[in-house]
Every structure is written in structure tokens, then in C-alpha cells.
Image: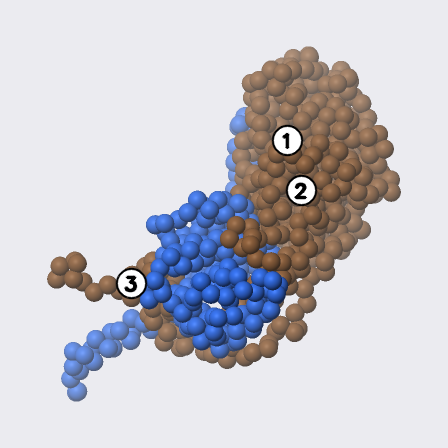
Chain colours: A blue, B brown
Amino acid sequence: MKKLSNTSILKNIAFLTVLFGGLSFYSFNCAPASFVVDDSGSLSLSSNGEIITGDGGPSLDVKVIAPQALLTSEQIYESLLNLTGQKATVTNGQIQEFERRSGSFGVSSQLDKVNAPMMIALTSFSGEICNGLVQREQGQPADQRKFFQGVNFGAAVAMLNETSYQESVSRMANSFLGRSPSSEEVTLFNQFRTEFIAAIPAANIGQNAQTRALVLSTCTALLSSFDVYTY
Amino acid sequence: MSRSKQVKPVWASSGHSKPVSRRDFLAHGMIPFAAAAFMPNWMKLLSPESAMAQVKCPEDVSSMIPFIQLNLGGGAGLAANYVPMDEGRQLLDSYDIIGLGNNQVPVTRVFGNAPFAGNGISNVLTGIQSAAQTATQNNTAFIGFCVQSRDDSSENYFAANGLVHKAGLVGSKLPALGSRDSNSGIGQLSALYSPPSPLIVKSYNDIANSLAYTAGLAALNQTQKEKLTKLIGDLNSAQARKLAATSSGAKFQELLTCVGIKNSELVQQGTAAVDPRSNAAVAGIWGLAANTNANSESFVLGSMAYNTILGQAGSSSFDKGGYDYHGNSRANVTNVRDREAGVLIGRILETARVLNKPVFLMVTTDGAVSAEKSASPTTDFNSDRGSAGMVYTFLYHPDGRPATTDFQVGHYTKTGQSADTDFIIGGSPELATQAVFLNWLKMNNRMDLYSQVVPNGRGMDASAIAQVVKVG
């Protein structure tokens, strides 16, 4: 019998770990959201000792059977701050915006609980998170920035070329989504950049603030996308 | 190796927290093979231009009658306002532990034929009559539901907003509205279904902000905001495409696409349409002015009622606390709070009248109260007593009072002064909520929806339905 080298053994162990880890993940990852406790038939006592029959038990809500779930309100707060590296420097503006919006996020992790105001709330909160991120990088020398190295915040938005813009999108995607942007996403962002600039009134086109606004909006869009608010 | 010289994991140097989720692990290359091995269908799901063109989003305006639930948290003495009757719709032998004295309680018939404690004893009624015009009262019917419930508990299955949503009550601009951070939006459990995450309204601004961007995005011009909203919708659709392999995942992808479309419309429309102050008559009912505190109860509930009755929001469910009030003076505390509840009920009905819309209003609580045995109909409440529970419903229609065949579902025991648990709903808040739901469906002329919404084994049979439906 061929004797396996230590390297081969380690490779096989790693392979099996990944294999069974993946299997257990896909079997049980979302278990808490999919399993419902059946409390039908339970009884309780009223204050004077009379028996009140329990109600029918489990909710009939249809669970979305997919390996994804929504981040809950607190998880959104933690996640967005962590992804942008602002956990330790959270601002009053960010806290206020979260408090203003938290009522829209809901308490359920079920995917089918998404609604329009929830998405507007997430976008608005993401906007304030990105506001802090852009502010931090704007104050740094270009070569020390993490996301916006090719952005000249002191120049008009027309000076931000497509290559530099795509580089920023790519850096944010790798950090926020854990992957490079897909070609479809790159196309969407490039189209957005073009339309965003076209929407600037002629009198304001030369304003430096429009460069910041484009970067802020791009960051906000990525931070409000499906792959960020689900897990 | 010293701790300081250990190699940092990738996630630590990337600014991320320690990976704990599927996406985290994928992001750090830990389960790519597993993903490919066990979910091979995902590999072919990234086909472009897929479901988007086939998406059919829900209609903008629901044809179902607006539904509002007012929940009086703590165990209000509803049976000491409406006078519960026995099985033959006669007075009980006595109401002395309910707090209405002996059987000499003066009864006044209102909202058609519903018995309330008269001579000013029912402060809920006094409140309603102070806030709703006679014309409004004349177009309002009442049905009381006799049901025991747990005292001081947020675990009674009295929340009906999931059921009415399931039956098709959706808002054109806003989701179902609630006032408490819970699945149902109030301090009650959802009967059978919870609604999509209710928008929790603790201030009018919560409604206004739900249609607009604030803080960092406020400086964008309107067109830029719309472009941003569209981009997010497109990104969501692209990223959620991977869910399309399963039927429920495909439905979610469709939902997400519709959310994106809806958001584009909402951001374009702005907030004026959801402001109750834009209607002078409604503003007058709720006492709203330009400088009204956005957190005030009248502004919050007025906004909720306004948007629900107009069909701009799904159902509204509003918690009003302060009803664990036994042990206090009836004259100085209990009556005052009952009157406050009555005023809110009256204002909701009045709002429907000025907007020329129907409304179905459900009033719930958790448990009830008992009084020291007394011949007086105004004795102080001294304890909890969930066995004397009630649910109220008020049905308003601008075309005239909705026809009803009875003013009560279930009954109180002749001598026990409690809801009879031998009747279908008497011991089950969930079935009582289903009974309310059935009457709402009947008011909508959509009884066919019951079997579609409530599956066999959890609902009522034809005989039971006939006993609990009182809308004529």
C-alpha cells in the first residue's frame, strides 16, 4: 500500500473538513429560522386560577427556504460599522440616523419580510455610514486611503475617470461583499456614474462637492445591496 | 511563538470581524468547494436578463376595507363598559365582580343595538361620543367578542394584522404599521401569521422618513436620489438572482424587484401625501398643527389611521399603555383612561367619515379586571381577572351602518360573570381573532378568502363560522 506523505494527509484532512463542514453548513446553517416550536395545546392559568386554553400554536408564516436570512436591526448596525472600519469611531450622526430608522428594519430575519420602507431606511443609514467613511478618507493623503486612492476630492466630478472610479468600486466590493464586483455590477456602476453626472445642473457641474456626492452614493449603493444585508 | 508575532488571519487585517456566516466563510475562501459541490444549480443561475421582465408586482391599492387594531395594554375593563350578555342575550344575574354592580346596571343601546353601561358609567362610550359626530355613530355597528385571555401578557394571539395582510390588505405606499418593536407591532402575538415587518411608528417622522433619505444623502438632488434608488434596486435584483433555484427563493427575488420598483416611486413622490395635516378636517379631528410634537400620541395614531384608512398603508396596530389600572381610583384614574380610549376610537371612526371611507376597528387588551363585590356600578377595580375578557369591534361605512345580526359573539356565563369557554372562541384568543377576521371578510363580501388564508385543522368549520359571523 502506498504510504501517504504528511502533506497528503494534511491535504486530505483539509478536504474532508471542507467537505463535511460545507455539508453541515448547508444542512443546518439556517436551522433556527426554519424550525418552529409547536406550542399547540399549551395551557395557562389566569390570575384567579381559571384555565385558559392555549391557542393553536405555531405561526403559519411561510419560511423562505434559502441559505440566506436578513440581518436584524442590531446586526445591521454592527455589520455596517464593522465593514467600513468605523466601529470605534461611530459618530453621533450615525447613531441618530440608526435610531431614526431602526423602526423600519424589523425584528424578523425572514427574507420575505422585506418591504420598501425597510430598504429606504437601510439606504439612508448606509448613506450616513458612508458619509463617515468618505469624510475619513477625504482627510487622508491619497496613498493612505483604503478605498478612494484615485479620487481627487478637490476636483470637479468630470475629472474622476472611469478607471479610478472602477478601482474604488472594486475595493469597496472586496471589503463589503468579500468578493470582486461581477461584470454585471461593474456595468451597473458605470451606468450609474454616467447618469449621476448627467443629473447635475450645469451651474453645479464644476463643484468639488459633486465628486464627493458620487463617491458617497456609490458607497451607499454597495452597502445597501442584498449581499450585505443578508447572510 | 509570542502572540505579537502570530500571523494575523486575513479577516483581521481586512477590517472585517471574525467570519461567522456563509458569506464570511466564502469571502475568506473557506468553503468555495463546498458551495460548488453541494449547490451545483447555483452555477447556472447567473444568467442575465432573467426574471426581471416577468415580475408581476402587487396592485397599488387594495380593495379590502381598512383594518385598525387598538390594543389597550394591561387588561382594560372592557366588560365594565360594554355590558356582556348571557347566551340568550339577557342580562347576567349580577355584574358585581365585573364592576357594574348588580343587575340594575343602566343599559343604553348604541351603534344599532349594542348594550353599553349608561348614565355616564361607560367612559369608553362617553369618549367615543365626545369625539365622533352623531352622523358617524349612526353609520357605525358594534360587535363584542366574549373571550378569556391571559392577564398582563403580550402572549395572547390577538394580533390580526397578519391575517388581514394575507387576505390582501396592503398599502399603496407603506407596509402595515405598528407601534411596538415586535413581530406584530403591538403587545399581542400574531394569530396564525405575522405581517411583513411592520413599520414601527413612534413618531410621525418615522412615517415621513420611510419615504425619504435623510442625513448624509439629504444633499443629493432629487434626480440623483432617484438614480441611487434605481441602482440599489438593480444591484439587489442581480445579487438575489442566485436564489431563483427554489420556488420560495424565486418569490423573494420577485419581492425584492417589486420593492425596488416601489422605492423608485416613493422617492419620487415625497412625504406630503402621508401627512395627515394635508387634510384640514383630519388635522382638526386629531388636533394637529404645524408645530405639533411629532412624538405625540395624537400625531402618531392620527398618521397611522389617516394612511391606513386612505389605503396608503396596510393595517395599523397601535399600543396604548396604562390599562393595568386596577388598584387605582375608578373616578380619578380608570375612568379617565377609559375615556381616553373612547376618544381614540371616536377619532378613528370620525377620520373614516371625513375621508368617506369604511373602516373596521378592533379593540383588544390582555386580561381584564375584577371589582370588590358591590351593588354599586362604579366600584373600584381591585385585581386582574382575565376570565372576564372582551374584544370590541366597530364597523363604520360611509353608506350607512353595516347590517349585523347580533351585537355579541359568544357569551358570559349567567352566574360566573365570565366568558363561557364552552363556546367556540370563549377560551381561545386565536379563535376569537379568527372570528373577528371572519366578520371583516364578511364586511368585504369575501368569505371565500377564509379557506384560502386559514388551512384545514387551524380554522373553523361551516357550523362554527355560522355562529361567529354576525355581519349581516
Q: Chain of mark 1?
A: B
Query: Which residue lies most toward the left here?
Result: B1
Q: Residue most toward the top?
A: B375
What subunit carries mark 3? Answer: B
Taking the spot 55% from the left edge, 50% from the top edge, the residue there is B214
Q: Residues within 10 Å of mark 3 (few under 14, many from 20)?
A: few
Residue at the limit of the structure toward the right, as seen here:
B399
* Spot occupied by residue B37 in the image (x, y as percentages of width and height): 40, 77
- The alpha-carbon separation of the residues under discs 2 and 3 comes to 47 Å
Residue topped by disc 1: B389
Q: Please indicate whether residue B295 sits to the left or right of residue B466 in the image.
A: left
Labels 2, 3: front one: 3
Q: Position of residue B407 (x, y in %)?
A: 78, 34
Instruction: Count residues near mark 2 (Cα–Cα under 10 Å), then give few for <14, some for 14-19, many for 20+.
Output: many
Q: Element at badge 1?
A: loop
Q: Residue at x 82, y 26 (%)?
A: B109
Q: Label 3 is placed on what type of residue?
A: Ser
- The mark closer to the camera, 1 or 2, is 2
Residue shown at 69%/24% (left/top)?
A: B339
Identify the image quadrant of the N terminus of chain B. bottom left
Labels 3, 1: front one: 3
Is residue A41 visible in this depiction of the protein?
A: no
Q: Which residue is mark 3?
A: B13
* Amino acid type, label 2: Met
> Label 2 marks which chain's residue?
B
Query: Is B377 rendered above or below residue B217?
Result: above
Determine contact: label 2, label 3, CB under 8 Å. Answer: no
Q: Quadrant of residue B260?
A: bottom right
Label 2 sits on residue:
B304
